[in-house]
Amino acid sequence: MNTKPGLVTIDDDRDSRAFIRTIGTRLGFAVTEVSDPSTFAQTVRQLQPAVVVLDLNMPNSDGITLMRQLRELKSEAYVLAVSGCDTRTLQTVSELGRGYGLKILGTVQKPATVAAVEQLLRSTNLAPANIGPKDLQDALNEGHVKVHYQPKLHRRDGEWRIGSVEALARWHHPQLGPIPPLQFVKLAEESGLIGRLTDTVMNQSLQQVRLWGNAGIDMPVAVNLSPLLVADLALPDRIRGLLQKYRVESTHFAMEVTESAAITDSRDAMDVLTRLRVLGIGLAIDDFGTGSSSLLQLFRMPFNELKIDQCFVMRIPENDEARRIVKATVDLAHAIGISACAEGVESQAVLDYLRAMGCDMAQGYHISAPVVPEKIPALVAQWNPGQRPAGQRAAS
Ligand code: C2E
Ligand code: CA
Ligand code: CA
C-alpha cells in the first residue's frame, strides 16, 4: 500500500527531473517523472498527485498549456513552476495559474536551489516528517501531545452563542515543530497507538471541562473517535470511569465518528455506539457528505448530531449548488430528529446563510481556529455577552 503523497515532475531535462526526484523522495513523496508533455494529462488523471512540478519551457509544450490541462482535469494538486524565465514572467504565470483556479505553490527560477524547492514543498504540509511509532510513543509519554479546542456556536433563541468545543490533538515535536494531526493520527492507527492517543485526548479534555466548570464556564467537549476504536467493547466503561474521575456529566461529553466508520455493519460497533448513547454521551457523525453511507445506515445508528463537511460549507457564498446541498442536509438531519452542525465557517456571510437555513450549530475560522484552553474564556466573553461565570451569578 502506497500512502505517500504523490508528486509528478514534468521536465524535458533529465537532470532537472532527477533533482526534483531527489528532494521529493527525501521529503517522503512518491515521485513520478514525465518527460513527454503528451502523456502529462493522462499521468495526472491516473495518479491524482498532491503536487505537480512544472517546467515552463519545454520543446513541445509550455507551462501555460500544462496548467490549462490541470484546470480541465480539475486537479487539486499544488503547482510549483520552475523556469529560466525572469521573475516578472514567473509572476505573471503564477497569476494566470491562480486565475485558472489552481493552487499555485510558487515559482522557482532555474537553476533552482535545493533550499528553495524544499521550502516550497514543505509549505504544503504534505511532506510527512520522518517520524515513527517510537517518536509518537515518546511524545505521549512526555506529554508533547496537547489538546486544542475549537469553539462551536449553537443557535439559542435566534442568537449564535458558544455552546461547546471540539477537542483537536496537537503534537509539537521539539526538533521538527508541529506535526500535522492527519499524519500522526494515521501513524497512531497504523502502529496500534490510537487507543493511547485517544485516552490522552479524552483525559485532557475531561480534566479541562472540570477546570472550566470550576471557573464557572459551562463547556461541553467533543472528542474525535477513530473508526478503529468504534468496535472497542471496553470503550464505554473507560469513558464512564473518566467521567466519574473528573466529575463531568455525560451530557458534557460527545464523540465524533466519521461517516465511513459509522457505516461499518459490525455488531460490536453498534453495541459500543448504543451503550455510549445510553450513557447519555452525545454522538456526532463527522464529515457528512464525504463518505458513502446510505440514509438507512444513518437512520439506524444512534447519532444525535450530523456535521456537514467543510467542503460544502466553504462554497456557500459563491455556489448555489453547495447552498442547496447544505440546506438539504440540514433538513435531512431535522427530518430524523437530530441537529445539524456546519464545519468550515470562514465568514459572517456563511453564518448568515446558515441561520436562514435553520442550521443549529456552526464551527470554523470565522468563529475561531482551535486554540489553547486558556483562550476559551475570552472567546466566550466575546460571543456570549451577558453570560457571567457562575461565581458571579445569584445562586439558583
Ligand atoms: P476534523 O475532525 O474534521 O476536524 C476539523 C478540522 O478542520 C481541524 O483540522 C480544524 O482545525 C479544521 N478547521 C476548522 N475550522 C476550519 C475552517 O474554517 N477552515 C478550514 N480550512 N479548516 C478548519 P485539524 O486540527 O488539522 O485536524 C484534522 C483532522 O485530524 C480532524 O478532522 C480529525 O479527523 C483528526 N484529528 C484531530 N485530532 C484528533 C484526535 O484526537 N483523534 C482522532 N481520532 N482524530 C483527530
Ligand atoms: Ca471532528
Ligand atoms: Ca469534520
Image (tube, rainbow, N blue to C red):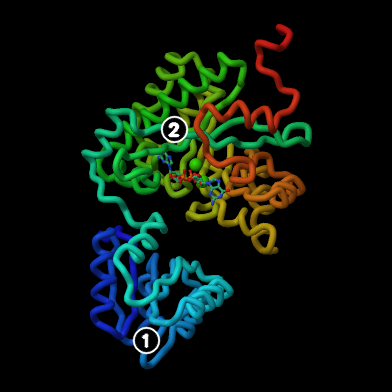
Q: Name the quadrant of the N terminus.
A: bottom left
Which residue is the site of mark 1? 37
| Residue 387 x/y as whole percent | 71, 22
Q: Residues within 10 Å of mark 1 (few under 14, many from 20)?
A: some
Which of the pair 134/59 is nearer the observer? 59
Residue 373, placed above or below residue 228: above
Which residue is the site of mark 2? 147
Q: Name the quadrant of the C terminus.
A: top right
Which of the pair 303/219 is nearer the observer? 219
Q: Are marks 1 and 2 in contact (CB under 8 Å)?
A: no
At x 34%, y 32%, the residue is 144
Residue lying farthest top? 395
Q: Residues within 10 Å of mark 2 (few under 14, many from 20)?
A: many
| Label 2 secondary element | strand
For marks 1 and 2, the one nearer the N-term is: 1
Identify residue type, mark 2.
Val
Which of the pair 187/367 is nearer the observer? 367
| Residue 198 x/y as whole percent | 37, 33
Quadrant of the image occupied by residue 188: top left
Q: In this view, does 44 lie to the left or right of 389?
A: left
Identify residue type, mark 1.
Pro
At x 65%, y 53%, the residue is 326
| Residue 291 x/y as whole percent | 48, 54
At x 57%, y 17%, the residue is 213
Rounded to the nearest whole Å, what is the CA distance between mark 1 and mark 2?
47 Å
| Residue 31 x/y as whole percent | 28, 69
Q: Is residue 4 left or right of residue 307?
A: left
Answer yes or no: is residue 267 visible: no
Does the beta carbon at disc 2 come under 8 Å from ligand 1?
A: yes
At x 55%, y 71%, the residue is 98
Answer yes or no: is residue 176 visible: yes
